[in-house]
Image: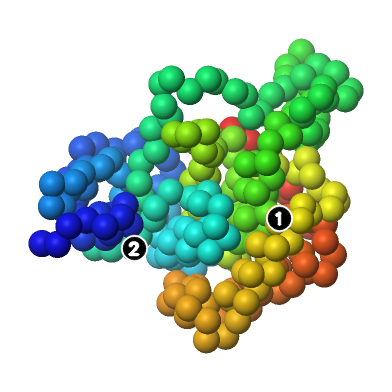
């Protein structure tokens, strides 16, 4: 066996050993160790057989959508999604993703908070009012953080219907990852997120440059478009192109449509 060249390579051809099940998840999520040629890593394995049917998504497609989200993330150059592959495993085909462990020596910096004020303080963006019990409300806010802002752009592109607080993972070197991208790439507007703080605000110059390059990568016959066509439908791929085009044309972060709940439940 040749030497492992990357985490994606390790996840693709390594031997999967199931260590246990993450029972908090709504679908079957198995914690595994993947090993190849002396290299090993922890990962999660989500077999297609363990996917719970959804009323608005075709059965057995969530693993492919997770792989597609990773490919788009990599195309942006932001690396916001842990290495994710689609492969066979002990319980059949499924998604296998690198398990991110937050570093112990990394300072704990909050990304979400509830504040009992009408306006967020410096460094925070307002999302929505939330009931906190006993007839009291608090303002849900998220950090005005460039990593979250990049993730908000990615979510708008892939049409993420489930960006919860628990899907944000700090990584080594100050990096931030987003996980759980099975509910993505629907052709209809399904964007539900806690990252509405920039709604209606101009995109950054960096985001516009990334989206311009992404539009070229999504052109028919381009490598990214070809790979996505193996994972999502032609209609869904066309919708990705349309969403990128709208972001570039308007030049602003999207706002809630009012036709779909804007915030996922539970939010965290």
Q: In which quarter of the image is the N terminus?
A: bottom left
**Other-residue count near label 1 (Cα within 10 Å), few / some / many at <14 / 14–19 / ≥20:** few
- The answer to whether residue 44 is seen in the rendering is yes
Q: Picture quarter containing residue 242?
A: bottom right
Instruction: Determine whether the residue tagged by mark 1 lies in a helix, strand or loop.
Output: helix
Q: Residue 128 carries which label?
A: none
Extreme-left residue of the structure? 1
- Label 2 CA crowd tier, 10 Å (few <14, some 14–19, many 20+): many
- Where residue 88 appears, as percent x and y from the top left, is 24, 63
User: Which of the marked residues, 1 or 2, is nearer the chain's N terminus?
Assistant: 2
208 with respect to 219 (left or right): right
Q: Residue 205: give x, y in percent of width and height.
A: 76, 56
The residue pinned by badge 1 equals 206
| Quarter in which the C terminus is drawn | top right
Q: Nearer the viewer, mark 1 or mark 2?
A: 1
Q: Position of residue 204 (x, y in %)?
A: 77, 52
Residue 93 or 49: which is nearer the viewer?
93
Figure colour scheme: rainbow
Where is residue 115 shown, x and y percent of the image? 77, 19
Instruction: Give the residue displayed 70% in from the left and 63% down from the top.
Output: 209
Residue marked by disc 2: 86
Q: In this view, does 103 lie above or below 216?
A: above
Say whether residue 168 is left or right of residue 142: left
Front-lying residue, 249 or 204: 204
Dividing the picture into quadrants, the one containing residue 11 is bottom left
- Picture layout, residue 33 above or below residue 134: below
Q: In which quarter of the image is residue 25?
A: top left
Q: Residue at x 39, y 53 (%)?
A: 83
Q: Which residue lies furthest to the top in this view?
A: 134
Residue 148 shown left or right of residue 33 in the figure = right
Residue drawn 42% across the image and 65% down it: 64
């Amino acid at each position: 066996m040749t030497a492992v060249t990357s985490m994606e390579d390790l996840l693709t051809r390594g031997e999967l050993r199931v260590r246990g099940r993450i029972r908090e998840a709504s679908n079957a999520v198995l914690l595994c160790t993947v090993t190849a040629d002396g290299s090993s890593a922890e990962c999660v394995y989500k077999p297609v057989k363990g996917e719970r049917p959804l009323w608005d998504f075709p059965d057995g497609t969530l693993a492919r959508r997770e792989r597609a989200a990773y490919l788009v993330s990599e195309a942006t150059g932001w690396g916001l999604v842990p290495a994710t592959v689609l492969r066979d495993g002990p319980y059949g085909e499924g998604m296998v993703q690198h398990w991110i462990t937050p570093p112990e020596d990394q300072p704990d910096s909050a990304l979400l908070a509830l504040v009992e004020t009408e306006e967020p303080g410096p460094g925070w963006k307002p999302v929505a009012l939330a009931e906190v019990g006993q007839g009291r409300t608090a303002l849900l806010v998220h950090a005005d953080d460039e990593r979250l802002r990049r993730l908000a752009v990615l979510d708008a592109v892939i049409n993420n219907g489930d960006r919860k607080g628990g899907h944000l993972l700090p990584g080594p070197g100050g990096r931030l990852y987003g996980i759980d991208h099975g509910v993505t790439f629907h052709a209809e507007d399904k964007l539900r997120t806690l990252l509405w703080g920039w709604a209606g605000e101009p995109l950054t110059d960096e985001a516009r440059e990334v989206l311009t390059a992404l539009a070229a990568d999504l052109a028919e016959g381009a490598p990214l478009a070809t790979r996505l066509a193996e994972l999502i439908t032609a209609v869904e791929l066309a919708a990705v192109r349309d969403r990128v085009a709208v972001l570039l044309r308007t030049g602003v972060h999207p706002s809630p449509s009012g036709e779909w709940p804007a915030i996922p439940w539970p939010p965290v």
